[in-house]
Image (cartoon, helix red, strand yellow):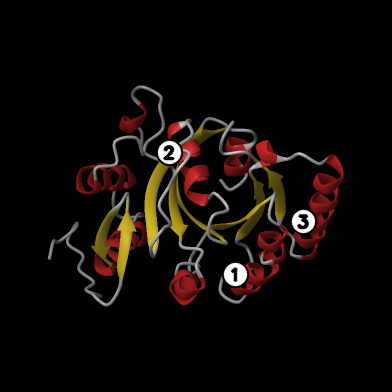
């Protein structure tokens, strides 16, 4: 067992996946604990500890010297949606600004940190990439607590994944704070082939967003279309 920043919370009943490596839940809960105490600790230290311990070489934003700045706030962003809609590819595009065409299905939860600058202010985003399979649904729901934002993703080529957005929305609304920002994202717009189908699905998604006071974006992790715009809306 490893001690992080003086905080220990041992919960070895669950294993999560971080960049292809498996860790006990207590490791991730340590990161949450650090975030909880961010008013007493330097949030920039969270970046340094995280990069060293899970070897995330590209988790911080790209400007030279940015790592010397202290983020004004840390936001917890949780990604949910059916398996295969492109959550991991979306996060990879956002963090690395390139496209990785294949990802193994996320097991449990994957975790990354990304710093962004909005209006001259620096923020750190904790990105929690959750598994879309039904067998992980109860685990995923645990991560909604204390989330500043939830991104619910569907595949624009899969009406089934869009229909399931309503189920994901129900799970989210049962757990999150009323002030939590919710964004619905239709991913894989580069695969659109039928303008009429695109219009019909967008109308369905728009109704869902309006009913739940959520934002709506259509994106492509492959070509980067509107990925950064959707994420900046969370900060």
Of label 3 and label 1, which has the lower sequence position?
Answer: 1
Q: Nearer the viewer, mark 2 or mark 1?
A: 1
Q: Nearer the viewer, mark 3 or mark 1?
A: 3
Residue designated by label 3: 205
Q: Percent position (x, y) of residue 82? A: 57, 62
Please report the residue visible at 65 percent of the width from the left and 50 percent of the height from the top.
Answer: 185
Q: Percent position (x, y) of residue 233? A: 62, 44
Residue designated by label 2: 115
Q: Percent position (x, y) of residue 165? A: 67, 64
Whether residue 37 is visible here, answered yes or no, is no
Please report the residue visible at 48 percent of the width from the left and 31 percent of the height from the top.
Answer: 97
Residue 66's place in the image compared with 187, above or below, is above
On the picture, is 176 further left or further right than 27?
right
Residue 227's place in the image compared with 141, above or below, is above
- Rendering quarter of residue 5: bottom left
On the picture, is 18 further left or further right than 217?
left
Element at label 2: strand
């Amino acid at each position: 067992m490893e001690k992080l920043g003086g905080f220990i919370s041992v919960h070895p009943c669950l294993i999560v996946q971080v960049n292809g490596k498996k860790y006990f839940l207590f490791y991730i809960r340590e990161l949450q604990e650090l975030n909880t105490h961010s008013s007493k600790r330097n949030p920039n230290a969270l970046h340094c500890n995280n990069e060293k311990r899970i070897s995330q070489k590209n988790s911080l934003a790209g400007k030279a010297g940015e790592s010397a700045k202290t983020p004004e706030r840390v936001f917890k962003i949780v990604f949910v949606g059916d398996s295969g809609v492109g959550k991991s590819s979306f996060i990879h595009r956002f963090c690395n600004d390139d496209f990785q065409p294949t990802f193994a299905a996320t097991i449990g939860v994957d975790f990354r940190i990304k710093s962004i600058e909005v209006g001259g202010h620096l923020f750190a985003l904790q990105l929690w990439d959750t598994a879309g399979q039904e067998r992980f649904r109860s685990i995923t729901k645990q991560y909604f607590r204390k989330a500043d934002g939830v991104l619910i993703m569907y595949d624009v080529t899969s009406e089934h994944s869009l229909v399931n957005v309503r189920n994901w929305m129900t799970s989210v609304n049962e757990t999150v704070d009323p002030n939590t920002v919710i964004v619905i994202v239709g991913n894989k717009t580069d695969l659109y082939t039928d303008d009429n189908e695109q219009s019909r699905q967008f109308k369905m998604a728009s109704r869902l967003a309006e009913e739940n006071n959520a934002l709506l974006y259509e994106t492509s992790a492959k070509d980067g279309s509107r990925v950064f715009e959707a994420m900046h809306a969370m900060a």
